[in-house]
Image (tube, rainbow, N blue to C red):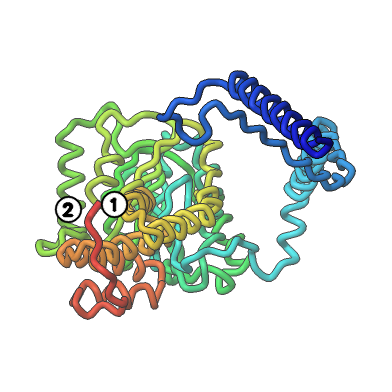
Amino acid sequence: MRRGRTAVSLGLSAAVHALLAVLLLSAGVALLPAVRKENALGDGSAFLFESPTPAKAAPRPPAVQPAVLPTRESTATAAIAVQSARDTAGRMQRSAELQRDTITATLPTVSRPLQTPSTMFAMAGIRLPTARRMVFLVDASGSMIGSYPAAVDAVLEAIDRLSDEQQFAVIPFQAGDAFLPDGDPLRRAGATLGQRGRDQLKAWLLERIVPSGGSDPTRAVRAALALKPDTVVIVSAGLLGAGHTTRDRDVLLTELDALNPRDARTGRRPVVFACIHLMQQEPLGALEVIAREHGLAGSYRFLPRLADLRETGDATLAQDDELIRGVAAAIDQAKSGEIAAARVALLRIGLAHPLHEASPAALLAAAEISLNHDHDARSARRLAGAAAHGARAFGLGSLQQRAEAIARDPNASILPAQTPEPNP
């Protein structure tokens, strides 16, 4: 009886626990959201990402404050120093000029700046590269009364700048006459002339020659060309005045053409004329025509003021470094592939500065570009010929040899062949 009651109690307890489990399970399922079969992984899920802990920044070195330079103060100080130097130089120059005669009397020769090449001539802004045998024709007519001493001084200063390799003569002319000093009129410049020779020449020109009469240069030109010069420099206030006609000018030019004829093959004349025209305009322009027909580019110079006679052309020597740097920069452009820019730069230098040693170097570089880059042998030959002529005038031996080699046979160029590139 007791065993039956125990069994019934255990059965009821199990049934109650089973019912409670069913009820709890049903309640949990009811609380869950409806799930659709097509849901993909992660739908309805929330993903949280924590930012990483930032790394500690490395300590920065203390900022260094740049030094502040006193720009204005430095500029002002430099300007004051430059002005002081100029003032000092001016005082020294004035003192030297006052004592010039005393100082130069103690020197065995006249000091002169170094010229390159040694056949350079510079006077009143005219510059000629090859002048080995020179004759100065100095107008001593009545129109030169006020300017003759200044003209003589300018000629003497030009002679002072000549080298030992050059010879010269000075022939004053007036009223159809030409005056030559005693002895050999063609003398060697430089140390051979010396201070004594210079003083004697100056005394003869200023004390023995008195400006007067007309300025017919015919006899003086004949006397000059009889000395077999390569250069004649005329210094005059005008060869033909108001009383002359165009016929007089034509007669003078015809006479000069006969004395200094143009070569039929080359078009060149044996003697180069340069004309320095002083003070007043010349109605018939004889000096300008002579310089144009018998001279080089830049062989005529009109100077309305006597002070301009002291311009020797040496100022252009200050451009030497700049021009040489220009050639080097253009060559660097060519090497870096800027062929068009290099060609333009080199041709500009060669054409704009025909009386400078940088010009043949520029023309040769342009020839090498034409040969090695453009494969244009004709242009290379022409440019190399011009470069060889200029190098010969300036005594640039190695450059002349390279230019002549290309001018003779472009295929024999000593330059290494370059890889052809499209012409820009």
Q: Nearer the viewer, residue 233 or 119?
A: 119
For the N terminus, give its image quadrant.
top right
Task: Give the quadrant of residue 149.
Answer: top right
Task: Give the quadrant of residue 66.
Answer: top right
The answer to whether 357 is drawn above or below residue 177 in the figure is below
Mark 1 or mark 2: name the one nearer the start of the chain. 2
* Horizontal arrangement in the rendering, residue 59 relative to residue 321 (left or right): right
In the picture, the disc for residue 295 is 1
Give me the residue at 71% from left, 36% from top.
Answer: 50
* Horizontal arrangement in the rendering, residue 3 relative to residue 242 (left or right): right
Outermost residue toward the front in this view: 1
Q: Nearer the viewer, residue 238 or 305?
A: 305
* Horizontal arrangement in the rendering, residue 131 relative to residue 293 (left or right): right
x%, y% of residue 178? 36, 53
x%, y% of residue 10? 77, 35
Q: Nearer the viewer, residue 126 or 36?
A: 36
The answer to whether 19 is drawn above or below residue 309 in the figure is above
List the residue tagged with mark 2. Answer: 257
Q: Secondary structure at mark 2?
A: helix
Give me the residue at 54% from left, 56% from top.
Answer: 321
x%, y% of residue 407? 21, 72
* Horizontal arrangement in the rendering, residue 156 relative to residue 366 (left or right): right
Residue type, label 1:
Gly
